Protein backbone atom coordinates (compact mmCIF):
# COMPACT_ATOMS: atom_id res chain seq x y z
CA UNK A 1 0.00 0.00 0.00
CA UNK A 2 1.46 3.37 -1.02
CA UNK A 3 0.65 6.56 0.89
CA UNK A 4 1.19 10.07 -0.45
CA UNK A 5 0.68 13.28 1.47
CA UNK A 6 0.23 16.61 -0.26
CA UNK A 7 0.15 18.83 2.80
CA UNK A 8 -2.71 20.69 1.77
CA UNK A 9 -21.35 7.39 -8.03
CA UNK A 10 -22.69 3.65 -9.03
CA UNK A 11 -20.84 2.25 -9.63
CA UNK A 12 -24.19 0.71 -9.84
CA UNK A 13 -23.94 -0.13 -13.54
CA UNK A 14 -21.18 -2.55 -12.68
CA UNK A 15 -24.05 -4.87 -11.94
CA UNK A 16 -24.75 -5.32 -15.64
CA UNK A 17 -22.34 -8.21 -16.04
CA UNK A 18 -24.29 -10.65 -18.15
CA UNK A 19 -25.27 -10.71 -21.79
CA UNK A 20 -27.93 -8.28 -22.94
CA UNK A 21 -28.39 -9.65 -26.40
CA UNK A 22 -31.77 -8.03 -26.89
CA UNK A 23 -30.17 -4.59 -26.66
CA UNK A 24 -26.87 -5.04 -28.48
CA UNK A 25 -28.28 -4.11 -31.89
CA UNK A 26 -29.09 -0.67 -30.59
CA UNK A 27 -25.48 0.14 -29.77
CA UNK A 28 -23.55 -1.64 -32.53
CA UNK A 29 -22.52 1.61 -34.18
CA UNK A 30 -21.57 3.10 -30.83
CA UNK A 31 -19.40 0.09 -29.98
CA UNK A 32 -17.23 0.88 -33.00
CA UNK A 33 -16.15 4.11 -31.28
CA UNK A 34 -15.48 2.30 -28.00
CA UNK A 35 -18.80 3.37 -26.55
CA UNK A 36 -17.60 6.65 -25.02
CA UNK A 37 -20.29 7.81 -22.60
CA UNK A 38 -19.91 11.52 -23.27
CA UNK A 39 -22.10 14.02 -21.47
CA UNK A 40 -24.95 14.23 -23.97
CA UNK A 41 -27.92 15.32 -21.90
CA UNK A 42 -29.40 18.57 -23.23
CA UNK A 43 -28.63 21.80 -21.39
CA UNK A 44 -31.73 23.54 -20.06
CA UNK A 45 -31.45 26.93 -21.80
CA UNK A 46 -35.13 27.92 -21.44
CA UNK A 47 -36.59 28.59 -18.02
CA UNK A 48 -39.44 26.29 -17.03
CA UNK A 49 -42.52 27.38 -15.03
CA UNK A 50 -40.89 26.05 -11.83
CA UNK A 51 -37.79 28.15 -12.47
CA UNK A 52 -39.86 31.20 -13.37
CA UNK A 53 -41.84 30.73 -10.15
CA UNK A 54 -38.61 30.79 -8.14
CA UNK A 55 -37.20 33.75 -10.05
CA UNK A 56 -33.70 33.17 -8.66
CA UNK A 57 -31.68 31.34 -5.99
CA UNK A 58 -33.48 29.22 -3.38
CA UNK A 59 -32.09 29.65 0.16
CA UNK A 60 -34.72 27.32 1.57
CA UNK A 61 -36.78 27.99 4.69
CA UNK A 62 -34.05 29.29 7.01
CA UNK A 63 -36.37 29.17 10.04
CA UNK A 64 -36.26 25.35 9.88
CA UNK A 65 -32.49 24.99 10.19
CA UNK A 66 -32.20 25.10 13.98
CA UNK A 67 -34.87 22.42 14.33
CA UNK A 68 -33.22 20.31 11.63
CA UNK A 69 -29.82 20.45 13.32
CA UNK A 70 -31.36 19.54 16.68
CA UNK A 71 -32.94 16.53 14.98
CA UNK A 72 -29.60 15.55 13.42
CA UNK A 73 -27.84 15.79 16.79
CA UNK A 74 -30.53 13.63 18.40
CA UNK A 75 -29.86 10.69 16.05
CA UNK A 76 -26.12 11.05 15.49
CA UNK A 77 -25.29 8.20 17.88
CA UNK A 78 -27.49 5.66 16.11
CA UNK A 79 -25.45 2.83 14.61
CA UNK A 80 -26.13 3.81 11.01
CA UNK A 81 -25.22 7.49 11.63
CA UNK A 82 -22.51 7.29 14.33
CA UNK A 83 -19.58 6.98 11.89
CA UNK A 84 -20.63 10.07 9.94
CA UNK A 85 -20.44 13.83 10.33
CA UNK A 86 -23.61 15.25 11.98
CA UNK A 87 -25.10 17.05 9.00
CA UNK A 88 -28.15 16.68 6.78
CA UNK A 89 -26.53 14.61 4.05
CA UNK A 90 -23.31 12.94 5.18
CA UNK A 91 -23.64 9.76 3.16
CA UNK A 92 -24.90 8.67 -0.23
CA UNK A 93 -27.72 6.49 1.08
CA UNK A 94 -28.75 7.91 4.42
CA UNK A 95 -26.36 6.00 6.67
CA UNK A 96 -24.38 2.79 6.55
CA UNK A 97 -27.49 0.60 6.35
CA UNK A 98 -28.41 2.21 2.99
CA UNK A 99 -32.05 2.74 3.94
CA UNK A 100 -32.17 6.11 2.07
CA UNK A 101 -34.06 7.67 5.01
CA UNK A 102 -33.31 11.30 5.96
CA UNK A 103 -35.78 11.82 8.78
CA UNK A 104 -34.52 15.31 9.68
CA UNK A 105 -35.18 16.70 6.20
CA UNK A 106 -38.37 18.71 5.66
CA UNK A 107 -41.12 18.52 3.09
CA UNK A 108 -42.36 22.10 2.92
CA UNK A 109 -45.61 21.45 1.12
CA UNK A 110 -49.12 20.49 2.15
CA UNK A 111 -50.46 16.93 2.42
CA UNK A 112 -54.01 18.05 1.58
CA UNK A 113 -53.88 21.23 -0.52
CA UNK A 114 -52.23 22.22 -3.83
CA UNK A 115 -48.48 22.69 -3.76
CA UNK A 116 -46.07 24.76 -5.83
CA UNK A 117 -42.63 23.52 -6.90
CA UNK A 118 -39.83 26.06 -7.19
CA UNK A 119 -36.58 25.30 -9.03
CA UNK A 120 -33.23 27.00 -9.51
CA UNK A 121 -30.36 25.73 -11.64
CA UNK A 122 -26.69 26.39 -10.91
CA UNK A 123 -25.47 29.30 -13.05
CA UNK A 124 -22.55 27.29 -14.44
CA UNK A 125 -21.82 23.64 -15.09
CA UNK A 126 -19.29 21.80 -12.96
CA UNK A 127 -17.71 20.62 -16.22
CA UNK A 128 -18.22 16.91 -15.61
CA UNK A 129 -21.09 14.66 -14.54
CA UNK A 130 -21.87 15.16 -10.83
CA UNK A 131 -22.25 11.92 -8.91
CA UNK A 132 -22.52 12.53 -5.15
CA UNK A 133 -23.53 15.39 -2.89
CA UNK A 134 -22.85 15.85 0.84
CA UNK A 135 -23.43 18.79 3.17
CA UNK A 136 -21.61 20.28 6.16
CA UNK A 137 -23.13 23.55 7.39
CA UNK A 138 -26.54 24.75 6.16
CA UNK A 139 -24.89 26.84 3.45
CA UNK A 140 -22.24 24.31 2.44
CA UNK A 141 -22.67 21.59 -0.15
CA UNK A 142 -19.96 19.47 -1.73
CA UNK A 143 -20.32 17.72 -5.05
CA UNK A 144 -17.97 15.09 -6.45
CA UNK A 145 -18.01 13.94 -10.04
CA UNK A 146 -16.11 13.91 -13.28
CA UNK A 147 -15.72 10.15 -13.48
CA UNK A 148 -19.08 9.21 -15.01
CA UNK A 149 -18.28 10.40 -18.52
CA UNK A 150 -15.32 11.47 -20.65
CA UNK A 151 -16.28 15.17 -20.47
CA UNK A 152 -13.44 15.71 -17.99
CA UNK A 153 -10.18 13.73 -17.75
CA UNK A 154 -10.64 12.74 -14.13
CA UNK A 155 -12.58 13.03 -10.87
CA UNK A 156 -13.02 16.25 -8.90
CA UNK A 157 -14.71 17.53 -5.76
CA UNK A 158 -16.21 21.02 -5.57
CA UNK A 159 -17.71 23.20 -2.85
CA UNK A 160 -20.82 25.27 -3.63
CA UNK A 161 -23.06 27.69 -1.79
CA UNK A 162 -26.41 26.07 -1.09
CA UNK A 163 -28.53 29.05 -2.15
CA UNK A 164 -26.75 30.60 -5.10
CA UNK A 165 -25.24 27.27 -6.20
CA UNK A 166 -22.08 29.19 -7.02
CA UNK A 167 -18.90 27.14 -7.12
CA UNK A 168 -16.48 28.25 -4.38
CA UNK A 169 -13.62 25.91 -5.19
CA UNK A 170 -12.95 22.78 -7.21
CA UNK A 171 -10.16 20.28 -6.62
CA UNK A 172 -9.12 17.86 -9.39
CA UNK A 173 -8.16 14.51 -7.90
CA UNK A 174 -6.42 12.84 -10.84
CA UNK A 175 -5.99 12.98 -14.61
CA UNK A 176 -6.75 9.62 -16.10
CA UNK A 177 -5.32 10.67 -19.46
CA UNK A 178 -1.97 10.65 -17.69
CA UNK A 179 -2.43 7.56 -15.52
CA UNK A 180 -4.25 5.46 -18.10
CA UNK A 181 -6.44 4.13 -15.29
CA UNK A 182 -10.11 3.25 -15.53
CA UNK A 183 -12.34 6.34 -15.25
CA UNK A 184 -15.58 5.54 -13.43
CA UNK A 185 -17.48 6.93 -10.44
CA UNK A 186 -16.51 5.71 -6.98
CA UNK A 187 -18.01 7.04 -3.72
CA UNK A 188 -18.08 10.19 -1.57
CA UNK A 189 -19.08 10.37 2.10
CA UNK A 190 -18.41 12.67 5.07
CA UNK A 191 -17.02 10.67 8.03
CA UNK A 192 -17.23 11.99 11.59
CA UNK A 193 -13.44 12.38 11.48
CA UNK A 194 -14.09 15.67 9.70
CA UNK A 195 -12.56 15.16 6.27
CA UNK A 196 -14.62 14.45 3.15
CA UNK A 197 -13.57 11.02 1.91
CA UNK A 198 -13.65 10.32 -1.81
CA UNK A 199 -13.02 6.94 -3.44
CA UNK A 200 -12.21 6.60 -7.12
CA UNK A 201 -10.26 3.88 -8.86
CA UNK A 202 -7.69 2.34 -6.51
CA UNK A 203 -7.42 5.55 -4.47
CA UNK A 204 -8.98 6.91 -1.31
CA UNK A 205 -8.70 10.68 -0.66
CA UNK A 206 -9.26 12.77 2.45
CA UNK A 207 -10.18 16.32 1.42
CA UNK A 208 -10.22 19.38 3.69
CA UNK A 209 -13.84 20.58 3.66
CA UNK A 210 -12.82 24.21 4.23
CA UNK A 211 -10.01 24.64 1.73
CA UNK A 212 -10.42 21.78 -0.74
CA UNK A 213 -6.84 20.67 -0.13
CA UNK A 214 -6.15 16.96 -0.44
CA UNK A 215 -4.72 16.12 3.00
CA UNK A 216 -4.09 12.45 2.34
CA UNK A 217 -4.36 9.98 -0.52
CA UNK A 218 -3.80 6.24 -0.30
CA UNK A 219 -3.50 3.53 -2.92
CA UNK A 220 -5.63 0.66 -1.61
CA UNK A 221 -5.03 -3.06 -2.19
CA UNK A 222 -6.71 -4.57 -5.25
CA UNK A 223 -5.83 -8.26 -4.95
CA UNK A 224 -5.50 -10.10 -8.25
CA UNK A 225 -7.02 -7.19 -10.18
CA UNK A 226 -4.52 -4.70 -11.66
CA UNK A 227 -4.86 -1.36 -9.77
CA UNK A 228 -5.75 0.50 -12.97
CA UNK A 229 -8.66 -1.90 -13.59
CA UNK A 230 -10.08 -1.59 -10.06
CA UNK A 231 -12.57 0.90 -8.63
CA UNK A 232 -13.59 1.36 -5.01
CA UNK A 233 -17.27 2.12 -5.59
CA UNK A 234 -18.82 1.19 -2.25
CA UNK A 235 -18.25 3.04 1.07
CA UNK A 236 -19.97 2.30 4.35
CA UNK A 237 -18.65 2.37 7.93
CA UNK A 238 -18.79 0.22 11.05
CA UNK A 239 -20.02 1.59 14.37
CA UNK A 240 -16.45 2.29 15.51
CA UNK A 241 -15.96 4.60 12.52
CA UNK A 242 -13.85 2.21 10.46
CA UNK A 243 -14.60 2.65 6.76
CA UNK A 244 -15.75 -0.42 4.83
CA UNK A 245 -14.90 -0.13 1.13
CA UNK A 246 -15.13 -2.54 -1.80
CA UNK A 247 -13.97 -2.74 -5.40
CA UNK A 248 -15.66 -3.45 -8.68
CA UNK A 249 -13.23 -4.62 -11.37
CA UNK A 250 -12.73 -4.35 -15.11
CA UNK A 251 -11.20 -7.40 -16.77
CA UNK A 252 -7.46 -6.92 -17.13
CA UNK A 253 -6.33 -5.60 -20.49
CA UNK A 254 -9.59 -3.92 -21.46
CA UNK A 255 -9.45 -0.17 -22.12
CA UNK A 256 -13.16 0.66 -22.24
CA UNK A 257 -13.87 3.63 -19.99
CA UNK A 258 -16.69 4.60 -17.63
CA UNK A 259 -19.65 2.21 -17.68
CA UNK A 260 -18.71 0.66 -21.01
CA UNK A 261 -16.49 -1.83 -19.20
CA UNK A 262 -19.55 -4.10 -19.20
CA UNK A 263 -18.85 -4.70 -22.90
CA UNK A 264 -15.21 -5.65 -22.35
CA UNK A 265 -14.41 -9.02 -23.95
CA UNK A 266 -14.33 -11.66 -21.20
CA UNK A 267 -15.65 -9.25 -18.56
CA UNK A 268 -17.16 -12.23 -16.74
CA UNK A 269 -13.55 -13.30 -16.08
CA UNK A 270 -12.71 -10.13 -14.15
CA UNK A 271 -10.68 -10.75 -11.00
CA UNK A 272 -12.49 -11.06 -7.66
CA UNK A 273 -13.39 -7.90 -5.76
CA UNK A 274 -11.60 -6.78 -2.61
CA UNK A 275 -13.17 -5.50 0.62
CA UNK A 276 -11.06 -3.40 2.98
CA UNK A 277 -11.40 -1.91 6.46
CA UNK A 278 -9.78 1.53 6.60
CA UNK A 279 -9.02 3.98 9.42
CA UNK A 280 -10.97 7.18 8.56
CA UNK A 281 -8.33 9.49 10.06
CA UNK A 282 -5.14 8.09 8.56
CA UNK A 283 -6.60 6.00 5.71
CA UNK A 284 -4.44 3.13 6.95
CA UNK A 285 -5.74 -0.25 5.78
CA UNK A 286 -6.52 -2.26 8.92
CA UNK A 287 -7.46 -5.46 7.07
CA UNK A 288 -8.56 -6.54 3.61
CA UNK A 289 -9.95 -9.67 2.04
CA UNK A 290 -10.31 -10.95 -1.51
CA UNK A 291 -13.98 -11.77 -2.07
CA UNK A 292 -15.34 -14.99 -3.63
CA UNK A 293 -16.01 -13.24 -6.96
CA UNK A 294 -16.26 -9.85 -8.63
CA UNK A 295 -19.16 -8.11 -6.90
CA UNK A 296 -20.64 -5.03 -8.57
CA UNK A 297 -23.24 -3.90 -5.99
CA UNK A 298 -22.17 -1.54 -3.23
CA UNK A 299 -21.63 -2.87 0.28
CA UNK A 300 -23.89 -2.36 3.32
CA UNK A 301 -22.98 -2.33 7.01
CA UNK A 302 -25.02 -2.85 10.17
CA UNK A 303 -24.70 -3.92 13.79
CA UNK A 304 -26.82 -6.92 14.82
CA UNK A 305 -26.81 -8.70 18.19
CA UNK A 306 -23.76 -6.69 19.19
CA UNK A 307 -21.70 -7.66 16.15
CA UNK A 308 -20.65 -5.55 13.17
CA UNK A 309 -21.47 -7.07 9.78
CA UNK A 310 -20.68 -6.26 6.17
CA UNK A 311 -23.22 -7.54 3.62
CA UNK A 312 -22.34 -8.14 -0.02
CA UNK A 313 -24.35 -9.25 -3.05
CA UNK A 314 -22.78 -11.70 -5.47
CA UNK A 315 -24.09 -12.84 -8.83
CA UNK A 316 -26.35 -15.43 -7.19
CA UNK A 317 -25.50 -15.49 -3.46
CA UNK A 318 -25.51 -13.11 -0.49
CA UNK A 319 -22.40 -12.99 1.70
CA UNK A 320 -21.70 -11.67 5.19
CA UNK A 321 -18.41 -10.68 6.78
CA UNK A 322 -17.87 -9.91 10.48
CA UNK A 323 -15.70 -7.03 11.68
CA UNK A 324 -14.26 -7.47 15.20
CA UNK A 325 -12.27 -4.25 15.31
CA UNK A 326 -9.17 -5.86 13.79
CA UNK A 327 -10.18 -8.37 11.15
CA UNK A 328 -12.77 -9.03 8.46
CA UNK A 329 -13.93 -12.65 8.53
CA UNK A 330 -16.33 -14.43 6.18
CA UNK A 331 -19.31 -15.66 8.21
CA UNK A 332 -19.67 -19.20 6.90
CA UNK A 333 -22.33 -20.02 9.50
CA UNK A 334 -24.68 -17.51 7.90
CA UNK A 335 -24.00 -17.79 4.18
CA UNK A 336 -23.57 -17.84 1.30
CA UNK A 337 -27.32 -17.52 0.70
CA UNK A 338 -28.79 -18.21 -2.79
CA UNK A 339 -31.40 -15.57 -3.60
CA UNK A 340 -32.41 -15.92 -7.28
CA UNK A 341 -35.20 -17.88 -8.95
CA UNK A 342 -35.20 -19.13 -12.55
CA UNK A 343 -34.57 -16.44 -15.13
CA UNK A 344 -33.71 -13.66 -12.68
CA UNK A 345 -30.45 -11.74 -12.95
CA UNK A 346 -28.12 -10.65 -10.16
CA UNK A 347 -29.29 -8.33 -7.43
CA UNK A 348 -28.56 -4.75 -6.47
CA UNK A 349 -27.02 -3.43 -3.25
CA UNK A 350 -28.56 -4.75 -0.01
CA UNK A 351 -30.35 -2.66 2.62
CA UNK A 352 -31.15 -3.33 6.25
CA UNK A 353 -34.63 -3.22 7.76
CA UNK A 354 -34.53 -4.37 11.39
CA UNK A 355 -33.90 -8.11 11.66
CA UNK A 356 -33.71 -8.52 7.89
CA UNK A 357 -31.34 -7.81 5.05
CA UNK A 358 -33.20 -7.21 1.79
CA UNK A 359 -32.14 -7.20 -1.84
CA UNK A 360 -33.91 -6.60 -5.15
CA UNK A 361 -33.15 -8.87 -8.13
CA UNK A 362 -32.76 -8.16 -11.86
CA UNK A 363 -29.92 -5.66 -11.63
CA UNK A 364 -27.64 -7.82 -13.76
CA UNK A 365 -29.40 -7.27 -17.07
CA UNK A 366 -32.85 -7.31 -18.70
CA UNK A 367 -34.85 -10.50 -18.28
CA UNK A 368 -38.30 -11.94 -18.95
CA UNK A 369 -38.61 -12.89 -15.27
CA UNK A 370 -40.35 -10.51 -12.85
CA UNK A 371 -38.14 -9.02 -10.15
CA UNK A 372 -38.28 -10.20 -6.56
CA UNK A 373 -37.68 -8.43 -3.29
CA UNK A 374 -35.89 -10.99 -1.13
CA UNK A 375 -35.63 -10.78 2.68
CA UNK A 376 -33.14 -12.91 4.63
CA UNK A 377 -33.08 -13.10 8.42
CA UNK A 378 -29.90 -11.75 9.98
CA UNK A 379 -30.35 -14.23 12.82
CA UNK A 380 -31.00 -17.33 10.70
CA UNK A 381 -30.15 -17.35 6.99
CA UNK A 382 -32.42 -20.35 6.41
CA UNK A 383 -35.36 -17.96 6.87
CA UNK A 384 -35.82 -16.39 3.45
CA UNK A 385 -38.97 -14.85 2.01
CA UNK A 386 -39.68 -13.19 -1.32
CA UNK A 387 -42.35 -11.22 -3.12
CA UNK A 388 -42.77 -10.24 -6.78
CA UNK A 389 -44.39 -6.80 -6.34
CA UNK A 390 -44.33 -5.74 -10.00
CA UNK A 391 -45.52 -8.67 -12.19
CA UNK A 392 -44.54 -8.33 -15.83
CA UNK A 393 -47.18 -8.01 -18.50
CA UNK A 394 -46.84 -9.92 -21.80
CA UNK A 395 -43.93 -8.62 -23.83
CA UNK A 396 -42.32 -6.72 -20.95
CA UNK A 397 -38.82 -7.17 -19.56
CA UNK A 398 -37.52 -6.38 -16.10
CA UNK A 399 -34.33 -4.47 -15.29
CA UNK A 400 -33.40 -2.21 -12.39
CA UNK A 401 -29.73 -1.61 -11.56
CA UNK A 402 -30.55 0.65 -8.57
CA UNK A 403 -31.29 -0.56 -5.05
CA UNK A 404 -34.53 -0.46 -3.07
CA UNK A 405 -35.25 1.82 -0.07
CA UNK A 406 -36.32 0.73 3.41
CA UNK A 407 -38.21 2.40 6.27
CA UNK A 408 -37.85 0.47 9.54
CA UNK A 409 -40.26 2.49 11.74
CA UNK A 410 -43.00 1.79 9.19
CA UNK A 411 -41.74 -1.71 8.22
CA UNK A 412 -41.95 -0.59 4.61
CA UNK A 413 -39.87 -1.34 1.50
CA UNK A 414 -40.02 0.60 -1.78
CA UNK A 415 -39.22 -1.25 -5.01
CA UNK A 416 -39.32 -0.26 -8.68
CA UNK A 417 -38.56 -1.56 -12.15
CA UNK A 418 -37.02 0.63 -14.84
CA UNK A 419 -38.21 -1.11 -18.02
CA UNK A 420 -41.93 -1.54 -17.12
CA UNK A 421 -41.83 1.92 -15.51
CA UNK A 422 -43.53 0.88 -12.26
CA UNK A 423 -42.98 1.19 -8.51
CA UNK A 424 -44.63 -0.32 -5.43
CA UNK A 425 -44.60 -0.14 -1.65
CA UNK A 426 -44.25 -3.36 0.35
CA UNK A 427 -45.00 -4.11 3.99
CA UNK A 428 -42.68 -6.48 5.89
CA UNK A 429 -43.54 -8.40 9.04
CA UNK A 430 -40.52 -8.25 11.37
CA UNK A 431 -41.26 -11.57 13.08
CA UNK A 432 -41.88 -13.75 10.02
CA UNK A 433 -40.35 -11.78 7.16
CA UNK A 434 -43.55 -12.19 5.17
CA UNK A 435 -44.18 -9.36 2.71
CA UNK A 436 -47.31 -7.90 1.10
CA UNK A 437 -47.97 -5.05 -1.30
CA UNK A 438 -49.08 -1.91 0.54
CA UNK A 439 -49.81 0.14 -2.59
CA UNK A 440 -49.04 0.00 -6.27
CA UNK A 441 -47.70 -0.85 -8.68
CA UNK A 442 -48.08 2.72 -9.96
CA UNK A 443 -46.59 4.39 -13.01
CA UNK A 444 -43.20 5.97 -12.28
CA UNK A 445 -40.04 5.19 -14.21
CA UNK A 446 -36.56 5.84 -12.85
CA UNK A 447 -33.08 4.42 -13.11
CA UNK A 448 -32.01 6.12 -9.88
CA UNK A 449 -32.82 5.69 -6.19
CA UNK A 450 -35.74 6.83 -4.03
CA UNK A 451 -35.24 9.10 -1.00
CA UNK A 452 -37.38 9.15 2.14
CA UNK A 453 -37.61 12.42 4.09
CA UNK A 454 -39.43 13.62 7.18
CA UNK A 455 -40.56 11.96 10.43
CA UNK A 456 -41.89 8.40 10.42
CA UNK A 457 -45.53 9.45 10.80
CA UNK A 458 -45.32 11.91 7.86
CA UNK A 459 -42.77 10.28 5.60
CA UNK A 460 -42.45 11.58 2.04
CA UNK A 461 -41.03 9.51 -0.81
CA UNK A 462 -39.01 11.50 -3.35
CA UNK A 463 -37.70 10.23 -6.68
CA UNK A 464 -37.38 10.98 -10.36
CA UNK A 465 -39.83 10.09 -13.08
CA UNK A 466 -38.65 9.80 -16.68
CA UNK A 467 -40.84 11.61 -19.18
CA UNK A 468 -43.59 9.27 -20.50
CA UNK A 469 -42.68 10.37 -24.03
CA UNK A 470 -39.34 8.57 -23.75
CA UNK A 471 -38.52 6.47 -26.82
CA UNK A 472 -37.56 2.81 -26.84
CA UNK A 473 -34.10 3.77 -28.05
CA UNK A 474 -33.65 6.24 -25.19
CA UNK A 475 -34.71 3.57 -22.68
CA UNK A 476 -32.24 1.09 -24.14
CA UNK A 477 -29.44 3.66 -24.13
CA UNK A 478 -30.20 4.45 -20.50
CA UNK A 479 -30.16 0.76 -19.58
CA UNK A 480 -26.81 0.31 -21.31
CA UNK A 481 -25.33 3.51 -19.89
CA UNK A 482 -24.48 4.92 -23.34
CA UNK A 483 -26.65 8.08 -23.27
CA UNK A 484 -29.22 9.88 -21.12
CA UNK A 485 -31.10 12.11 -23.54
CA UNK A 486 -34.56 11.88 -22.00
CA UNK A 487 -35.99 14.41 -19.55
CA UNK A 488 -37.29 13.65 -16.07
CA UNK A 489 -39.08 15.29 -13.18
CA UNK A 490 -39.01 15.01 -9.39
CA UNK A 491 -42.10 13.50 -7.74
CA UNK A 492 -42.99 13.82 -4.05
CA UNK A 493 -45.40 11.14 -2.76
CA UNK A 494 -47.05 10.55 0.59
CA UNK A 495 -45.11 7.42 1.51
CA UNK A 496 -47.96 5.85 3.45
CA UNK A 497 -50.44 5.92 0.55
CA UNK A 498 -48.51 6.68 -2.64
CA UNK A 499 -50.54 9.84 -3.21
CA UNK A 500 -48.69 12.42 -5.31
CA UNK A 501 -48.12 15.60 -3.29
CA UNK A 502 -46.08 17.53 -5.84
CA UNK A 503 -44.28 17.04 -9.12
CA UNK A 504 -41.78 19.28 -10.85
CA UNK A 505 -41.38 20.25 -14.46
CA UNK A 506 -39.33 17.96 -16.69
CA UNK A 507 -35.64 18.82 -16.62
CA UNK A 508 -32.60 17.30 -18.36
CA UNK A 509 -31.75 13.80 -17.13
CA UNK A 510 -30.35 13.30 -13.66
CA UNK A 511 -27.10 11.44 -13.23
CA UNK A 512 -28.12 7.77 -13.09
CA UNK A 513 -27.77 5.54 -10.07
CA UNK A 514 -27.81 8.23 -7.38
CA UNK A 515 -30.26 9.84 -4.97
CA UNK A 516 -32.08 13.11 -5.13
CA UNK A 517 -30.35 14.47 -2.03
CA UNK A 518 -31.98 16.55 0.71
CA UNK A 519 -30.42 19.75 2.03
CA UNK A 520 -31.34 22.12 4.81
CA UNK A 521 -34.48 24.24 4.87
CA UNK A 522 -36.64 21.90 2.81
CA UNK A 523 -34.38 21.90 -0.26
CA UNK A 524 -33.83 18.92 -2.54
CA UNK A 525 -30.88 18.73 -4.92
CA UNK A 526 -30.96 17.04 -8.30
CA UNK A 527 -27.59 16.36 -9.92
CA UNK A 528 -28.04 16.69 -13.67
CA UNK A 529 -26.07 14.64 -16.17
CA UNK A 530 -25.21 17.85 -18.06
CA UNK A 531 -23.08 19.03 -15.13
CA UNK A 532 -25.55 21.40 -13.46
CA UNK A 533 -27.14 21.17 -10.02
CA UNK A 534 -30.88 21.85 -9.69
CA UNK A 535 -32.24 22.98 -6.31
CA UNK A 536 -35.96 22.38 -5.70
CA UNK A 537 -38.35 23.44 -2.96
CA UNK A 538 -42.03 22.67 -2.37
CA UNK A 539 -44.42 25.03 -0.61
CA UNK A 540 -48.20 25.36 -0.42
CA UNK A 541 -49.48 27.10 -3.53
CA UNK A 542 -50.19 30.79 -2.92
CA UNK A 543 -53.23 30.50 -5.19
CA UNK A 544 -55.01 27.59 -6.84
CA UNK A 545 -54.03 29.00 -10.22
CA UNK A 546 -50.69 28.65 -11.92
CA UNK A 547 -48.29 25.75 -12.03
CA UNK A 548 -49.25 23.83 -8.90
CA UNK A 549 -49.82 20.23 -7.99
CA UNK A 550 -53.00 19.15 -6.24
CA UNK A 551 -52.39 16.81 -3.33
CA UNK A 552 -54.99 14.24 -4.26
Image (cartoon, rainbow, N blue to C red):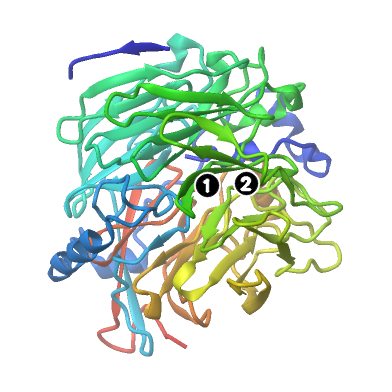
Residue 501, compared with residue 90, is above or below; it is below
Q: Position of residue 504 (x, y in %)?
A: 41, 68
Quadrant the N terminus occupies: top left
Residue 156, compared with residue 308, is above or below; it is above
Number of the label disc, if any, that sits on residue 210: none
Q: Position of residue 100 (x, y in %)?
A: 45, 58
Residue 523 picture quarter: bottom left
Q: Which residue is mark 1?
A: 512
Q: Which residue is mark 2?
A: 478
Q: Residue at position x 72%, y 67% from top?
A: 387
> Closer to the observer: label 2 or label 1?
1
Lateral position of residue 120 relative to residue 391, left or right: left
Q: Residue at position x 30%, y 41% from top?
A: 190
Q: Residue at position x 71%, y 28% from top?
A: 263
Residue 431 picture quarter: bottom right
Q: Are marks 2 and 1 in contact (CB under 8 Å)?
A: yes
Residue 104, compared with residue 109, is above or below; it is above
Lateral position of residue 5 relative to residue 469, left or right: left
Q: Looking at the image, which is closer to me, 367 or 190? A: 190
Q: Position of residue 478 (x, y in %)?
A: 62, 46
Q: Looking at the image, which is closer to me, 333 or 443? A: 333
In the structure shown, which secondary structural element does the residue marked by tag 1 occupy? loop
> Residue 491, can we see it?
no
Determine crowd level at label 1: few under 14, some 14-19, many 20+ residues with C-alpha closer than 10 A.
many
Q: Looking at the image, which is closer to me, 182 or 483? A: 182
Disc 2 to disc 1, C-alpha distance: 8 Å
Residue 546, compared with residue 50, is above or below; it is below
Q: Position of residue 67 (x, y in %)?
A: 17, 69
Amino acid sequence: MKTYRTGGRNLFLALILISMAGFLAVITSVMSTQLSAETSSPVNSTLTPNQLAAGGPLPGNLSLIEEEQECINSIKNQTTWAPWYPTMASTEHGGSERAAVFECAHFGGSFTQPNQVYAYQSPTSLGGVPAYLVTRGPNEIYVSGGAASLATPGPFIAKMQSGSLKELWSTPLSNNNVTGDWLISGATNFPAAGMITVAQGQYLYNVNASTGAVENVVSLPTGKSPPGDSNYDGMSAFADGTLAVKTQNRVAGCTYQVYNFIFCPNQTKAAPSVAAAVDPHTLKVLDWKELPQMMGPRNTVTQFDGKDYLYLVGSSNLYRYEWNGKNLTLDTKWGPVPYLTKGQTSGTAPAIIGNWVVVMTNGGGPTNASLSVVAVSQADASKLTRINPIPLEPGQKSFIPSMLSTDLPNNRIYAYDYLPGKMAAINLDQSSGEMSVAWGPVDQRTISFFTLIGPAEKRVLVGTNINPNVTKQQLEQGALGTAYTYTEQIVWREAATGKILAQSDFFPAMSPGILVTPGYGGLIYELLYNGHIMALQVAPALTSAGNSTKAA
